[in-house]
């Protein structure tokens, strides 16, 4: 199974750590959308499984990831999973925008993962931020387990 994980991780690199933990288990290629100037999403057509993740920004995934996801090649029998790190609140609603985009293109969403990430946005910096140390080793282990369960469920 050929897998790729595409991510944006601009605030503290929280999501990058999750992406790396998942990529090790899946033996996936990793695409940092901030490091690449202009990635053509068409290159993703050759993958069986696509992971998409970022921090949560104003209640959704990062705009750069959302834009990228909207331009994915239409899926023939493609599978995708979604992930995020976030400051607070339950993850479900935060994933809806991204989920809708990939489902509209015909992808099966085969799993979703989220954990807390260190957050110093705005006034939070005055108190030293929240979720210091997150994602921690336990979060990364959960992320790896999640990725492992995906690779078992997809042929
Ligand atoms: C501008 C900005 C907006 C944010 N908005 C939210 C939000 O709406 N909900 C939330 O749970 N976290 C929010 N956060 C916290 C980030 O989602 C969290 O710190 C995340 O782990 C950052 O991931 P990254 O380091 O991979 O970019 C926000 C952070 C920033 C900087």
Image (cartoon, rainbow, N blue to C red):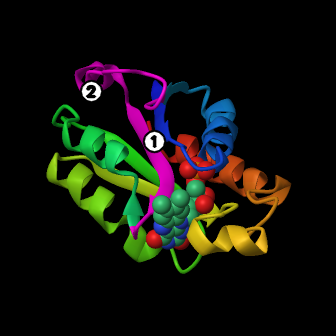
Left or right relative to 20: residue 136? right
At mark 2, the secondary structure is helix
Range shown magenta: 32-59
Q: Visible in this render: residue 1? A: no
**What residue is shown with label 1?**
154
Q: Position of residue 136 (x, y in %)?
A: 81, 56
Mark 2 highlights which residue? 41
Q: Position of residue 61 (x, y in %)?
A: 40, 57
**Farthest residue, direction bottom:** 89
Residue 126, magenta (yes or no): no
Reply above or below: 59 against 18.
Answer: below
Image coordinates of residue 49 in percent, x first then y, are: 41, 35
Q: Secondary structure at mark 1?
A: loop
Task: Answer few, some or many: residues within 10 Å of disc 1's Cα (few below 14, many 20 plus, some between 14 and 19).
Answer: few
Q: Residue at x 54, y 43 (%)?
A: 9
Residue 57 is a magenta residue:
yes
Q: Residue at x 33, y 50 (%)?
A: 63
Residue 80, by quadrant, is: top left
Q: Quadrant of ligand 1?
A: bottom right
Q: Residue at x 18, y 47 (%)?
A: 106
User: Does 17 sit left or right of 133 as displayed?
Assistant: left
Q: Pointer 2: residues within 10 angstroms few (<14), some, or many (20+)?
A: few
């Amino acid at each position: 199974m050929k897998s790729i994980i595409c991510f944006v991780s601009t605030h503290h690199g929280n999501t990058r750590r999750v992406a790396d933990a998942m990529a090790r288990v899946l033996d996936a290629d990793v695409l940092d959308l901030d490091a690449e100037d202009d990635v053509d999403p068409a290159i993703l057509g050759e993958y069986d499984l696509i992971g998409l993740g970022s921090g949560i920004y104003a209640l959704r995934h990062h705009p750069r990831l959302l834009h990228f996801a909207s331009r994915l090649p239409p899926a023939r029998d493609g599978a995708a999973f979604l992930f995020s790190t976030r400051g607070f609140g339950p993850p479900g609603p935060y994933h809806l925008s991204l989920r809708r985009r990939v489902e509209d293109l015909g992808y099966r969403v085969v799993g979703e993962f989220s954990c807390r990430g260190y957050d110093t946005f705005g006034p939070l910096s005055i108190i030293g931020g929240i979720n210091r140390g997150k994602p921690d080793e336990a979060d990364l282990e959960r992320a790896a387990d999640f990725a492992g369960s995906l690779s078992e469920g997809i042929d």
